[in-house]
Image (cartoon, helix red, strand yellow):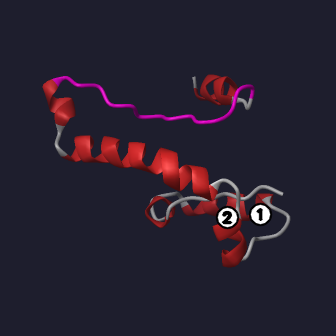
């Protein structure tokens, strides 16, 4: 089973068809209590979310207008988890 965990503000901007696809692709939808205990939530909140928040703050400060490049795609995962494959499929 795959659980798709997105912050609430991300899901409001995802196309409706994509959300339906994600919901259909898992065999059973997890309950809210299961999501809170899912292993991906803690590392995401502790390590990744602060970095994404920092990039968002810089984007709001319009640093890109000064020529500073901010990441537009971030792929996170363990060694051999398919990060390169994800990026190659986007190219």
> Would you say 49 lies left or right of 76 here?
left
Q: Secondary structure at mark 2?
A: helix
Instruction: Identify which residue is drawn at 64% across, 69% down.
Output: 36
Where is residue 68, by image quadrant?
A: top left
Task: Choose between 71 and 46: the one closer to the eye.
Answer: 46
Check the picture and name the quadrant holding the C terminus. top right
| In the foreground, 58 or 79 | 79
The magenta segment: 67-80
Res 24 label: 1
**Disc 1 + disc 2, Cβ < 8 Å:** yes
> Is residue 44 in the magenta section?
no
Disc 1: CA contacts within 10 A as few (<14), some (14-19) or many (>=20): few
Residue 62 at x, y = what percent? 17, 39
Residue at horizontal 51 percent and vertical 55 percent from the top: 45
Left of 84 or right of it: where is 67? left
For residue 20, which numbered disc appears in the image? 2
Is 77 or 10 nearer to us in this picture?
Answer: 77
């Amino acid at each position: 089973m795959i659980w798709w965990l997105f912050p609430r503000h991300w899901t409001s901007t995802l196309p409706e068809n994509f959300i339906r696809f994600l919901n259909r692709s898992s065999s059973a939808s997890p309950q809210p209590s299961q999501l809170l205990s899912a292993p991906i939530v803690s590392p995401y909140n502790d390590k990744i979310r602060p970095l994404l928040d920092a990039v968002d703050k810089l984007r709001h400060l319009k640093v890109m207008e000064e020529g500073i490049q901010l990441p537009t795609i971030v792929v996170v995962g363990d060694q051999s988890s398919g990060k390169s494959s994800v990026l190659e499929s986007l190219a």
